[in-house]
């Protein structure tokens, strides 16, 4: 029995490849064609003239020895600031100066009641008179003792001769034994009297020294009482301006209590902190006696000042410097600005602020392209020929030569190698 199946048509691929292998082969051929086309594409020609060129303003560098200007902010201080206090207990009877007043040296400021001081002075004076009287009495007693001592010695000699005669008379049988004993007793009494007188003379020196010490003590108490009496009148110790008056009439004050605060108007100074990077210049100026000029500005007034000294300690990124005002009277603790002209710095260049990039560098133009240079900032500077006294910054940059063109305009995308065209200023 013959069975005839259904005739099914089949598609056969070349080279006996399966469908999967054929798909991979086609993908590989497509990749090879794409890479070949990309490699053989024509190269685009770059036009050098299409590179952007930026216009910048430049300044011809002229390194020279220039003096930087430093702007500081200071406070008026008074080293001669004093607070006068009471030296004794007393009542306030008069106040002649109040805050804001001025006083000449020696002028009366405050009066205290002197009644108690007068009583103490009288007592001290009486004590001195008593000590003087005792010392005068001692001098008289000393003179009397010296005279009496000579007399006692003469009496002793007489007593000794009397005893010698009595012994002879007793041996001759003329004088009784009782009379001889009486003569000997008189001799012993005279010897005792002489010893007592000699002791009194020797002790006189010690007594005199004691009385002299008492006299000096009495004199010191009198001087203290006189000083307390004088201290009931409070006078200005210098040319002064009064900052505050601490008492009023009728107040009772005690020793050490504050009465009035004032300062010496002839010793007013300006204290300003100088940043650390400028301290070397100030120290050099002080050591080499170089001129440092300063001008203080307060309430629209420009006042000359001179640099006097640097503080012995620093802090807060700088150090305090002190300046003496010349012929000016400013209130203590007031604030002001100070323009300081430092000694000249070698190889310095004055540039406008727009020439500074990132606060630390400038750009020089070489062969039509920018070149970045690091700088050292020396301070502000005001050229004499600058329009409207514009402020410049004084810098020093290693490698800058006279005639180099320094960019003085700001470019947002300024980098080394950027092509520029210059507009010289």
Image (cartoon, helix red, strand yellow):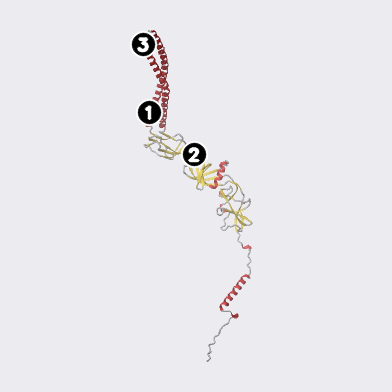
Q: Which residue is most to the bottom? A: 1
- Residues at badges 3 and 2 in contact (C-beta under 8 Å)? no
Image depth: mark 3 or mark 2 in front = 3
Most foreground residue, 68 or 169: 169
Upstream in the sequence, badge 1 or badge 2?
Answer: 1
The residue at the point 59 percent across, 74 percent down is 28
**What percent of the width, then of the height, locates residue 114?**
38, 32
Q: Secondary structure at mark 3?
A: helix
Upstream in the sequence, badge 3 or badge 2?
Answer: 3
Q: Is residue 320 above or below residue 209?
A: below
Most foreground residue, 329 or 399: 399
Upstream in the sequence, badge 1 or badge 3?
Answer: 1
The residue identified by callout 3 is 177
Q: Is residue 329 above or below residue 26?
A: above
The residue identified by callout 2 is 267
Disc sitting over residue 123 in the figure = 1
Most foreground residue, 409 or 256: 256
Q: Which residue is most to the left? A: 178
Density class for disc 3 (Cα within 10 Å; few <14, some 14-19, many ≥20) is some
The Cα atoms of the two marked residues, 1 and 2, are separated by 42 Å
The Cα atoms of the two marked residues, 1 and 3, are separated by 65 Å
Image depth: mark 1 or mark 3 in front = 3
Q: Is residue 312 left or right of residue 129?
A: right
- Residues at badges 1 and 2 in contact (C-beta under 8 Å)? no
Q: Is residue 26 left or right of residue 247?
A: right
Most foreground residue, 126 or 308: 126
The residue at the point 39 percent across, 16 percent down is 188
């Amino acid at each position: 029995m013959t069975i005839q199946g259904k005739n099914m048509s089949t598609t056969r691929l070349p080279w006996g490849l399966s469908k999967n292998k054929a798909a991979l082969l086609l993908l590989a051929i497509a990749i090879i064609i794409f890479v070949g086309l990309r490699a053989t594409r024509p190269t685009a020609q770059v036009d050098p003239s299409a590179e952007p060129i930026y216009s910048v303003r430049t300044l011809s560098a002229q390194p020279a020895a220039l003096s930087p200007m430093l702007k500081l902010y200071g406070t008026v201080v008074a080293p001669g600031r004093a607070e006068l206090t009471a030296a004794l207990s007393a009542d306030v009877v008069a106040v002649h100066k109040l805050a804001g007043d001025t006083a000449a040296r020696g002028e009366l400021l405050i009066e205290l009641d002197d009644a108690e001081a007068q009583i103490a002075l009288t007592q001290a004076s009486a004590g001195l008179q008593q000590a003087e009287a005792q010392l005068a009495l001692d001098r008289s007693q000393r003179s009397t003792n010296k005279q009496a001592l000579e007399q006692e010695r003469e009496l002793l000699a007489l007593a000794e001769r009397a005893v010698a005669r009595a012994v002879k008379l007793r041996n001759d049988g003329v004088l009784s034994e009782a009379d001889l004993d009486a003569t000997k007793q008189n001799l012993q009494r005279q010897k005792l009297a002489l010893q007592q007188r000699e002791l009194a003379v020797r002790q006189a020196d010690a007594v005199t020294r004691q009385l002299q010490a008492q006299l000096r003590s009495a004199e010191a108490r009198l001087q203290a009482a006189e000083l307390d009496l004088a201290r009931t009148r409070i006078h200005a110790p210098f040319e002064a301006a009064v900052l505050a008056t601490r008492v009023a009439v009728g107040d009772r004050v005690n020793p050490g209590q504050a009465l009035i605060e004032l300062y010496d108007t002839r010793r007013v100074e300006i204290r300003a902190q100088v940043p650390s990077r400028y301290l070397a210049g100030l120290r050099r100026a002080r050591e080499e006696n170089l001129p440092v000029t300063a001008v203080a500005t307060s309430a629209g007034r420009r006042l000359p000042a001179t640099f006097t000294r640097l503080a012995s300690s620093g802090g807060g990124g700088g150090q305090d410097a002190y300046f003496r005002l010349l012929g000016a009277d400013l209130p203590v603790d007031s604030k002001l600005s100070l323009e300081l002209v430092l000694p000249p710095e070698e190889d310095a260049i004055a540039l406008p602020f727009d020439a500074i990039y990132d606060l630390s560098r400038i750009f020089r133009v070489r062969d039509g392209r920018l070149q970045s240079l690091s700088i050292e900032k020396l301070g502000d500077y005001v050229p004499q020929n600058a329009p409207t006294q514009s402020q410049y910054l004084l810098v020093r940059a290693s490698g800058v030569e006279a005639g180099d063109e320094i960019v003085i305009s700001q470019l947002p995308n300024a980098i080394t190698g950027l092509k520029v065209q210059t507009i010289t200023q």
